[in-house]
Image (cartoon, rainbow, N blue to C red):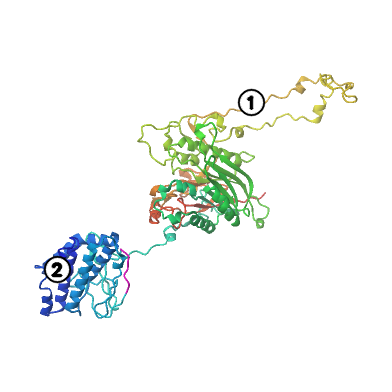
Amino acid sequence: VTAVSCCHSLAPDLQPLLYAFFTCRKNALLAKSSSPQVEGDFAMAPQGLDQEECEGLLQQWREEGSSQVFSTVSEGPLVDKGLAQSSLALLMDYPGEQDAASEDKWCSRQLSDLQAAENLEEPSPTVLGEESLPEGEGPMWAAVPMQAGPQYADCTILPMGALAAEEWEEDPAVVAWSLAPEPMPQEEAPIWSFEGLGQLQPPPVEIPYHEILWREWEDFSTQLDAQGLEAGDGPQFQFTLMSYNILAQDLMQQSSELYLHCHPDILNWNYRFANLMQEFQHWDPDILCLQEVQEDHYWEQLEPSLRMMGFTCFYKRRTGCKTDGCAVCYKPTRFRLLCASPVEYFRPGLELLNRDNVGLVLLLQPLVPEGLGQVSVAPLCVANTHILYNPRRGDVKLAQMAILLAEVDKVARLSDGSHCPIILCGDLNSVPESPLYNFIRDGELQYDGMPAWKVSGQEDFSHQLYQRKLQAPLWPSALGITDGCQYVTSCHPKRSERRKYSRDFLLRFRFCSIACQRPVGLVLMEGVTDTKPERPAGWAESVLEEDMSEPEPEPEPVSPRTVGTIQHCLHLTSVYTHFLPQHCRPEVTTMPLGIGATVDYIFFSAESCENGNRTDHRLYQDGTLKLLGRLSLLSEEILWAANGLPNPFCSSDHLCLLASFGMEVTAP
């Protein structure tokens, strides 16, 4: 009576729970005992708690009270969490062999807990771990699978017996508590469903990050090319190349708002450095192209560690006050360096090129194993860069790319005017099928009148009233680069007909008239300058004019500037297709602010082929450089499942790109 009368003074949100508790206990006792004493124990209960009202009360508790209880369990203070769990556990208790005194004791205990919770101002963790009762007074509590009786689907009725004692679990996802029964034959236990919550399942087992971010290796070595020949026919020099933006620590700290979803521990450089080195060791590329390499980290940790792994490294820091740059590393056991050309996009006095981005171009000679005999492999040109990020300045991006392509053209050009195989990779801050991407792949772009933001396709600024538009010429002639993305000096043919002055030709001037005249101011020295040369008989006093005249120099050709169009002749195509057919989703290489995008690329030398000439899905035909395989990328949904980038498994905000190539080996 006291407990019932006091329940009216409790908080309104706890009253339905307590009424349901008393009513459910009453029905359970009536179902198991016909003694009138049991009926009398509940004689002073609130009037009207018959079977219909019991069911109505439980229905009301499910509709109105369950959300409050479960929100308390998952989000509320520890005191409320413990009380909610205890109340729910008592609700499902089976009183089969307990007497009325024991029942009153449990009721008084639960009521005192509820009253104490209302008087507490701060949560107390001690409520979670309730003291176990003596063996004679009652059983201990444990988490067990739910087993509903046929008469009371909403109340769990368990047979009494030897009870297994277990500790309280603190997982908020576990909301069903009851007495632990003796081991019984396995039966399919129904799941307790709550309206609005669906069916409560056990918390899912955490999937390891390496399984979520699993990336398949796609092998193309046995596929047919456009001519129907296997890509692996004949001897080949095979190698792998990785391109990776490793996220400079300084840049991460300057833009910390982009990484609020990450635990601070996984953003620590020492943690990230160890992860990056494990990734390098796992994939073991022959050529490594890195972007956002912080200078102090490079010289103190990255370069020594990569050198121990067998790499020779070249580094170019960004100009100005920037602390990061690009690096290209290769294994000297596979390649020999022919030349290295750092590229700076900053040009003093040019407003278009006032940014500090850089690139790095290496010319490498593959080292053929001795077992192949006297064979040769063409040199390989590798270019690595990180283009300006600013989505609004597509004009700057195109000018930077033109400088890089001009440098690649100079380094990769052979004596016959052709180019050796080329690989161009890096973070280009442009999405697939954007004008900048199409310019690299197709070799031509008509830009006149194009909005600058449209060049990279990163963001849509079409709603803005003022939009910077590209105008021809895109860069001034003082830059020294043509609209064909070549240095001006590279376009001039060498003078093959230049006069060769032989000794006999020069001796013809020995006794000419001007040579026999004493120069004015010549110091007189006996035996040296005091004699006049005597012209031998038959020696002409002057050399014929036609013999002395040197041919006029050829006028240097003027490279015409095309109106609003830029081109290049390097014939590049992308390693990746930027689409995942098995998931019907686009590939992504980074996830800024949780939005997936592709901005990292590996382009390589390959001849494009028309749609009508294709025999498979590829848009190119193999040349000297063949694509043998690549490491698949991931979709945005998969990266979301791993909490985006960076995460404990991948320590950069970009995914690495990895591809395998083969080069033709020819006899000398």
Q: Horizontally, is 626 left or right of 455 in the view?
A: right
| Residue at image mark 1 | 555
Q: Amino acid at mark 1?
A: Pro
- Residue 362 quadrant: top right
Q: Quadrant of the N terminus?
A: bottom left
Mark 1 falls on what kind of element? loop
Image point (68%, 53%), residue name: 374
Counting residues from the start of the chain, the first of labels 1 and 2 encountered is: 2
Q: Is mark 1 in CB contact (under 8 Å) with mark 2?
A: no
Q: Horizontally, is 597 left or right of 42 in the view?
A: right
Q: Is residue 254 visible?
A: yes
Q: Amino acid at mark 2?
A: Val
Q: Which mark is residue 413?
A: none
Instruction: Write the start and end of the magenta stretch as one range.
Output: 166-172
Relative to 361, is 113 above or below? below
Q: Position of residue 631 (x, y in %)?
A: 48, 54
Distance between mark 1 and mark 2 Cα atoms: 111 Å
- Residue 415 quadrant: top right
Camera-near label (1 vs 2) is 2
Q: Position of residue 666 (x, y in %)?
A: 63, 50
| Residue at image mark 2 | 4
Mark 2 falls on what kind of element? helix
